[in-house]
Image: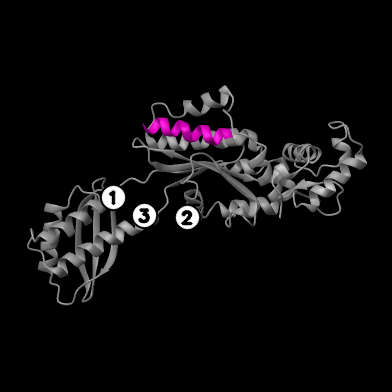
Amino acid sequence: MSEPIGDLSNRMRDIFRLVVEAYLDRGQPVGSKALAGSVSLSPASIRGVMQELEERGLLTHPHTSAGRIPTEIGLRLFVDGIMHSSLPPARERQAIEAQLKDRSIEDALEAATATLSGLSACAGVVLAPKNELRLKQLSFVPIAADRALAVLVGMDGSVENRVVPLAPGTSPIALHEIGNYITARLSGLTLGEAQLRLRAEIAERREAIDAAAAELIAAGLAAWSEDLDQRPVLIVRGQANLIDESAAADLERVRRLLDELEDRQEIARLLDGARDGEGCRIFIGSENRMFALSGSSVIAAPYRGSDGQVVGVVGVIGPTRLNYARVVPMVDFTAQALTRYMR
């Protein structure tokens, strides 16, 4: 269990910071001789401090190497207690904002994600706002005595089918009448609005629709509502950035990470966890179950729509050896730029 950064002596904080910064810069274990020129301590004294930091769970040494690297707990301590977010350089801010001009929402999200990926040398990800499907037509075709095929047509021309239970004795004429009711009363509404209208009209007995018909319509609408709620609208760009010269020494980790990036549903769930904060959320290594095997980090921040509500999340996925001081402000600024764009 690590201790808060404030519980470390000034000497320990200095050595800890130098080890983390050197590791993030070069990706190699850091030895006492490499730090001797940066502090007024002998290599032997530096080794003693590094040993104490290791005993506190902040550093470790891989294999038989005399050099140290930060543990995941150490990286978390560094990120939370030492690094402070600031604006990225003007050049990077301009590159991000340039991707949001005169584009549709979908194109702007893709372009911003690709730019963020290129600037950070990570995989860029964005959880896009969900477009509410508006109902144009919902019809039911009997396929067995107890089942019907529900065919939903959206106002955007999309067509999807689902099999729903059919009440015994439901006739094709009744199904046709149900279709007429939907076209007349529910067309043009979102699925949520259609469900509310259906419940209200049944409660007020404003329509001659029996309980069996109402249940059938409700089942059809619910099937799509649940499906759309669970379907992530996720964009991933720049996976190739994860394969660089340093990846050659750790091909198994990179392979695992690329495999993990194929699971869009899990990535969407992970990003959803960043919706509740005002700024960036950082998941380091095994802090998130999904990327525990590859030991990767996720930096993500929410962005908001015109009503001020969170509508999506943008971020990057890469190795734990990230330049957090540079990448965190970049992700945070991209989220702010998307919020301004959405307004």
Position of 314 relative to 204 (above/below):
above
Look at the numbered discs 1 and 2 and tell me whether their residues touch, using CB distance below 8 Å. no
- Residue 229 in the figure: left or right of residue 153: right
x, y percentage for residue 182? Answer: 15, 56
Element at label 2:
helix
Q: Is residue 217 magenta?
A: no
Q: Which residue is mark 3?
A: 229
x, y percentage for residue 58? Answer: 74, 49
Of the residues under marks 1 and 3, which one precedes in the sequence? 1
Badge 2: residue crowd in 10 Å (few <14, some 14–19, many ≥20): some
Q: Which quarter of the rendered picture does the C terminus lie within?
A: top left
The residue positioned 75% from the left and 42% from the top of the image is 27
Taking depth in this image into account, of 188 and 171 the one nearest to the observer is 188
Q: Which quarter of the rendered picture does the N terminus lie within?
A: bottom right
Res. 321 visible in picture:
no
Q: Which residue is mark 2?
A: 265
Q: Amino acid at mark 1?
A: Ser
Position of 90 relative to 284 (above/below):
above
Rendered image quadrant of residue 177:
bottom left
SS assignment for the magenta stretch, majority: helix
Looking at the image, is mark 2 or mark 3 nearer the viewer? 3
Q: How is the image coloured?
A: one colour
Q: Is residue 342 magenta?
A: yes
Q: Which residue is mark 1?
A: 158
Q: Amino acid at mark 3?
A: Asp
Res. 308 visible in picture:
yes
Looking at the image, is mark 1 or mark 3 nearer the viewer? 3
Q: Which residues are magenta?
A: 329-343
Q: Amino acid at mark 2?
A: Gln
Element at label 1:
loop
